[in-house]
Amino acid sequence: MMRALSLVILLAGYWALLSGQFHNGFLITCGVLCIAFVCWMASRMGLIDDEGAPARYYVGLLLYVPYIAWQVILANWDVLKRIWSSELAIDPRLTRIRHGTRAGFVTVTYANSITLTPGTVTMEVTETEMLVLSLTKEGEDGLIDGDMERRCKRLEGG
């Protein structure tokens, strides 16, 4: 029941953020009905579980999002500089990065965070490591350093 309630709150917040409709009773009613329908369907499909609605990670994600947004900005800037400058090397490399994440949600968040930052792509994920394509040695070194993994592991309390 708590997971269903967290899903309702998350969907309501998302709807309010995107629509901005706080003055129109008809649209608010439609939003409430849509949220109820989605939650009912998710419940019938068995999607309201820890994997489908990982409520325990929501607060940690609020702290993680600014970090990953900043990493995306920095990586975009680095890739842009390398595209426009002939002096900065592009040296593609495949690397296996070991990870210690335990929860599937956190592992997927980590792998997607790597792919989200320009210049790196996660190509394969196993229980203990990820195969990552990096455009530069610096990008590879940043992943080996493990700052992104440490921040992801905070989501699971590690």
Image: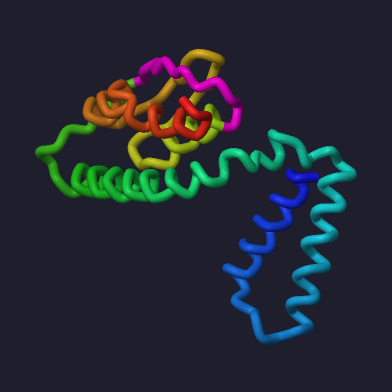
Q: Nearer the viewer, residue 9 or 71?
A: 9
Residue 5 is left or right of residue 136, and the answer is: right
Residue beneath the point at 61% across and 39% down: 56
- Residue 149 in the image: above or below residue 84: above
- Residue 155 in the image: above or below residue 25: above
Q: Nearer the viewer, residue 136 or 143?
A: 143
Q: Is residue 124 magenta?
A: no
Residue 19 in which image quadrant: bottom right
Q: Position of residue 116 (x, y in %)?
A: 43, 42
Residue 149 in which image quadrant: top left
Residue 81 is left or right of residue 33, and the answer is: left
| Highlighted range, magenta | 94-105
Residue beneath the point at 57% across and 39% down: 57
Residue 135 is left or right of residue 7, and the answer is: left
Is residue 75 visible in the rendered structure shown here?
yes
Q: Position of residue 147 (x, y in %)?
A: 32, 30
